[in-house]
Amino acid sequence: FFFGMSDATSFLTNFLAGGFSGAVAKTCTAPIERVKLLIQTQDANPKIISGEIKRYTGIVDCFVRVRAEQGFAAFWRGNLTNIIRYFPTQAFNFAFKDGIKAMFPKYDKKKQFLQFFMTNMASGGLAGAGSLCVVYPLDYARTRLASDVGGGKRQFNGLMDCLSKTAKFGGIGALYNGLGVSVVGIIPYRGVYFGLFDTLSGFNPYQKDKSNVLRAASKFACAQSSAIAAGYASYPFDTVRRRLQMQSEKPKDQWLYSGTADCFGKILKNEGTAALFKGAGANALRTVGAALVLVLYSEITGAVGGE
């Protein structure tokens, strides 16, 4: 079928298991992810730059203010769009990762560890980059819907309103602002995320243990380690991507950053290296969701006859 996969049933199983796992995990961790996005993008938010809304001083301050200013339900603002985006993204990541991996020679993890690890890294990175290109406008909309600050009128009323307004004022290309750095960043993220997980799983003595608790706990430990490492490896790229997305609907003469290199340069010059990791603490908490995705996917495919 695709990339040497055995048949359509195998692809569909991977697609549905990956998508369902992603939807559940994203809904559970939506409040943490929203706080992460608010902290990460606040220095590119016009309301905060102008002084209309004061800056968030940290994770706790952000949680408290969002609850007070926008209500408890606001923690899930943009979550439906995120699920719509995440279902095909995560599903294609998993489905194509296995297909792409099948294109590489099989290596013995004990005798050819480097080749084994690099194959897992490459298949994970290529799958992530490919799926991101397909669903990028949804990723853009998710960022913008979740980055509204204060208790006033929302800038966008929903997914279609966000996409249509951005395309109207900035053209179709505005929906893809930051795509280049996203593709560059997704390769180390997905590469480490999937590559390290597959590698650790290969050495996990409890991977196929008969005890459901022991098996799931060991998989979660592998997944959590992989997700945290991947998050920090790619976080600077993610920060630049979000900053570029925050200016998409504006005329180019109002842009804070002219492109990826300019954005990196201005952040480093004006805010320091640490600014590239703003929100990374919340992101580390958010990786619980990413780890949950890997465990759910592994358990679901195992239950229906997968490996």
Image (tube, rainbow, N blue to C red):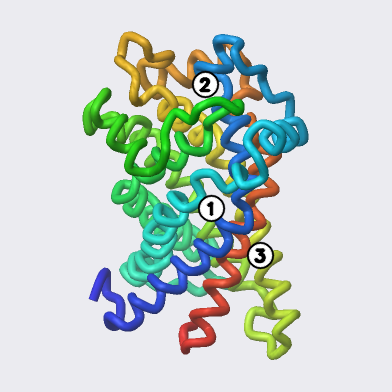
> Which comes sooner in the sequence, label 1 or label 2?
2
Mark 1–mark 3 Cα distance, whole angstroms, equals 12 Å
Q: Picture quarter containing residue 256? A: top left
Q: Residue at x 56, y 25 (%)?
A: 152
Q: Amino acid at mark 1?
A: Val
Q: Which residue is mark 3?
A: 222
Say whether marks 1 and 3 touch (CB < 8 Å): no
In depth, the one of 36 and 11 nearer the eye is 36
Q: Which residue is mark 1?
A: 192
Q: CA distance from mark 2 to mark 3?
A: 36 Å
Please tell me whether mark 2 or mark 3 is closer to you in this view: 2
Q: Which mark is residue 45?
A: 2
Give residue 193's quadrant in the image.
Answer: bottom right
* Nearer to us: label 1 or label 2: 2
145 left or right of 134?
right
Dot placed on the residue nearer the N-terminal end, 1 or 3: 1
Q: Disc 1, disc 2: CB below 8 Å?
A: no
